[in-house]
Amino acid sequence: MLEVKQVSKTFNAGTVNEKQALREVSLTLQDGEFATVIGGNGAGKSTLLNLVAGVFAPDSGTISIGGRDLTHLPEHKRAQFIGRVFQDPMLGTAATMQIEENMALAMRRGQRRSLRIGITKAEREQYREVLKILDLGLEDRLTSKVGLLSGGQRQALTLLMATLRKPDLLLLDEHTAALDPKTAAKVLEATERIVQKDHLTTMMITHNMKDAIQHGSRLIMMYNGRIVIDVSGEEKKRLTVPQLLELFNKVSGSDEADDKLLLS
């Protein structure tokens, strides 16, 4: 579903601030595969996600989704293939609109607009049913303004909106980093339920090693612009945080993991 081939990206090339963010990275995600991507600051994980999303183009290499070469397709045109949830819970929803109005916008993304009545009774029932998967009671608050929700509730709603039309690829950009641990755990549980229910191909960026191990079917660790660890199946299930740190130290040739990575 996702194929990244020999992708490289350098920022501020030819200046004193030159930074080679990605170094000939190749990655393939099969249909329905849920990969967690972890790494310290400057490892290249966010750059990889932004290249896939179309925020900027690679210097070299290709990016394909569902067999379509999207390497030079602008970000707004990739929206029909990609669902994305950002780190900031405030970014994915319209605060002054109701929950059902936000969901209607997400459901009709990419469709032609008309002057017909806003939300039908059948649509409202559909929204109520899909909201139940979040287990937050939002199915009984369809007419509440989104601005009245907590950060965790808004992020969970954003996640649901990003997956309503079942994208070819779901990108989760540290989508629980701004939440408290208890709320983050609930959003991650909802993420697992949605991804499994709809068999969504997913890439989740995180700093949290425990979350990277516990969630998804595959774990990828990046260091210095390269993929240094790629485990899945039983090998991933058996991993512990100390083992992952030891493995990282071995393949990176460094015993100094990033502070944010360790603290998470």
Image (cartoon, grey):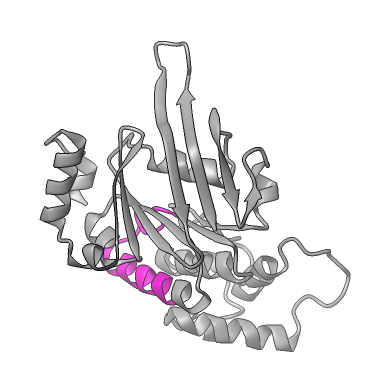
Q: Position of residue 4 (x, y in %)?
A: 50, 45
Horizontal and vertical percent position of residue 8: 47, 31
Front residue of this view, candidates 157 and 83: 83
Residue 45 magenta-highlighted: no
Res 178 visible: no
- In the figure, residue 151 lies in which quadrant? bottom left
Foreground of the two, 201 or 104: 201
Left or right of 1: which side holds 156?
left
State the residue at coordinates (59%, 80%). 142
Q: Quadrant of residue 204?
A: bottom left
13 lies above or below 212: above
- Describe residue 76's horizontal placement relative to residue 129 as left or right: right
Q: Per the image, is 176 magenta?
A: yes
**Residue occupying image coordinates x 11% and y 36%:** 255
Q: Nearer the viewer, residue 210 or 125?
A: 210
* Nearer the observer, 42 or 87: 42
Give the quarter of the figure containing the N terminus.
bottom right
Residue pictured at 61% horizontal, 78% vertical: 143
Q: Where residue 109 sits in the image (x, y, percent)? A: 71, 63
> Where residue 223 appears, x then y in whole percent?
29, 37
How many marks the image carries: the answer is: 0
Q: Which residues are magenta?
A: 172-193
Q: Is residue 234 visible?
A: yes
